[in-house]
Amino acid sequence: MTIEERIAKSKTSLFKAVFPNTTNHYDTLFGGTAMQMMDEVAFITATRFSRQRMVTVSSDRIDFQKPIPAGTFVELIGQVAHVGNSSLKVNVEIYTEEMYSDHREQAVKGEFTFVAIDENKKPEPLKI
């Protein structure tokens, strides 16, 4: 399988509902909660691509473009953006959808870097 095919096959999408227990005093999703969800989707994407042990080593520029209100759905989409020797970058976007209309827009985007590790938690080359 080519790298392009692996990238396409590892694209990950996850839907969640934004409930009041995940919101701040402005009734919008906590930024930290959004980042946690993004890291989870990025981890799943990286692992599906590599089928190796992967760990987050950095999150690069998280852009919060729109607030995410309680009572909406969010879709998180992760896709491998760059493949290195032992690391890879995953772009994650969050789209917000109103529950009772077709309105949908991008709310957050960010990039996460992962490294493949061996059983001793030391970096190892990607097996691609």
Image (cartoon, grey):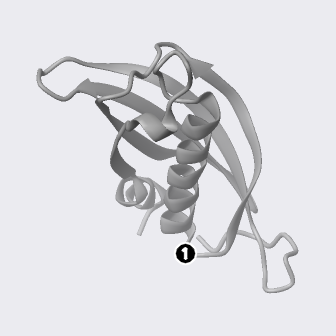
| Quadrant location of the C terminus in the rendered image | bottom right
Residue 32 placement, left or right of 66: right
The image quadrant that residue 112 belongs to is: top right
Residue sitting at the far bottom: 119
The quarter of the rendered structure image containing the N terminus is bottom left
Q: Which residue is drawn at 46% across and 32% down?
A: 93
Amino acid type at image mark 1: Arg
Above or below — where is 1 with respect to 5?
below
Q: Nearer the viewer, residue 100 or 8?
A: 100
Q: Is mark 1 on a helix, strand or loop?
A: loop
Other-residue count near label 1 (Cα within 10 Å), few / some / many at <14 / 14–19 / ≥20: some
In this view, the residue in front, 13 or 8, is 13
Residue 102 image position (x, y, % from top left): 13, 21
> Is 33 or 65 nearer to us in this picture?
33
Q: Residue at x 63, y 36 (%)?
A: 111
Question: Relative to 83, is 103 above or below?
Answer: above
Residue appearing at x 36%, y 60% in the figure? 9
- Quarter of the image for residue 68 reads top left
User: Could you say where residue 75 lies in the image, as x and y percent from the top left?
Assistant: 34, 38
Relative horizontal placement of residue 38, taking residue 1 as reference (left or right): right
Furthest residue in direction left, as rendered: 101
Q: Decide if residue 115 is in sight here.
A: yes
Using the image, determine if residue 44 lies above or below residue 52: above
Tell me, yes or no, if residue 81 can be seen here: no
Residue 104, quarter of picture: top left
Q: Where is residue 45 in the image (x, y as percent from the top left)?
A: 50, 57
Residue linked to disc 1: 51
Q: At 72% across and 32% down in the image, what residue appears? A: 60
> x, y (%) of residue 51?
55, 75
Q: How many marks?
A: 1
